[in-house]
Image (spheres, helix red, strand yellow):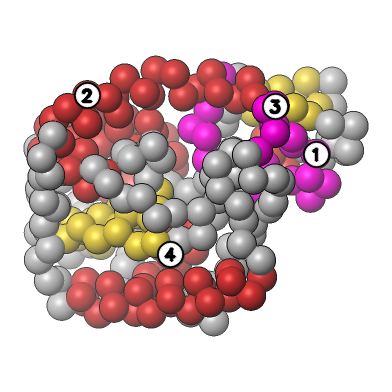
Amino acid sequence: MKSALCYFSGAGNSKTVAQDLGTMLPLDSILPIADVMNDPSLLEGTDTLGLVFPIYFYGPPALMKRFILETLHALDLKLDYLFVILTHGGMPFYAASITDRLLAEAGYAASYVSPIAMVDTYVPLFRIPDSKKQTLKHTKIAKRIEKIGKELLEQQLKVATRLPLSRLMHTMWDRSLELRGEKDRHFVITDACTGCALCARTCPVKNIAMEGGKPTFLHACEQCFGCYHRCPEHAIALDPKPLRGYGWYTPPKSFKA
């Protein structure tokens, strides 16, 4: 028997959730999705698989679509238990239905699907809460992770519900992916940039290259805002400016701490 948990994370929320679940579950490995896409053999022989990833624009990131339809489909794993944890900033909407359809197309069916509300890090629309509100939110997240972890240990069944209009919403989400990559044109590198290249090293889809000591965006962006939040100098600005003002967020190393 072999168990693995794979995650995609931009600003860091999903990675922390994956690591916290890893302290509760008998996992053999916790792997970034990108690593598995580069080396699918990492999952060979897996019979229990978990996926943790954020919801962007009411659906999975584009990378998750490729991972499910290409990598997982090609692996053709014989899974006894497949669980999916969807992190979101308050609007899960059709993400579970869309993920369910993608998995079915790849030849899989999730045994357990659950959303978990996080601090919303999408700065163009939402204000980052102050530290007191973040602490309260983290407490709720910790309790939610504890509950999910116990249910996963028992291998409970909680399947996704296909909501009305889910096929239409799937089509709209799919088309939105074609426009997402170009949105990195709204990022502006200010004079505060020191050329540390942290953004390029940590971009989960390798969408940032260093040219002349400054980051350049390659227009395959997921809009995860990981680069924006991680920049130690806050040197990545937005044009137009965020609707509710600038703010930055760093998730804790553990929500359970």
Tell me which numbered mark, 2 or 1, is placed earlier along the sequence: 2
Q: Quadrant of residue 177?
A: top left
Nearest to the observer: residue 146 or residue 88? 88
Asked if the residue under mark 1 is in contact with the one under mark 3, i.e. CB atoms within 8 Å, the reply is: no
At x 70%, y 33%, the residue is 241
Q: Quadrant of residue 197?
A: top right
Q: Nearer the viewer, residue 152 or 122?
A: 122
Which of label 3 and label 4 is nearer to you?
3
Q: Position of residue 67 (x, y in %)?
A: 31, 35
Kindly identify which numbered label has been placed on residue 239.
3
Whichever of callouts 3 and 4 sits on the residue coming sooner in the sequence is 4
| Residue labelled with disc 1 | 235
First of labels 2, 4 by sequence position: 4
Residue position for label 4 = 17
Q: Which residue is mark 2?
A: 171
Say which residue appears at 25% left-offset and 36% top-offset.
68
Asked whether 146 falls inside the magenta stretch, the response is no
Q: Secondary structure at mark 3?
A: loop
Q: Type of residue at label 4?
A: Val
Q: Position of residue 129 (x, y in %)?
A: 61, 62
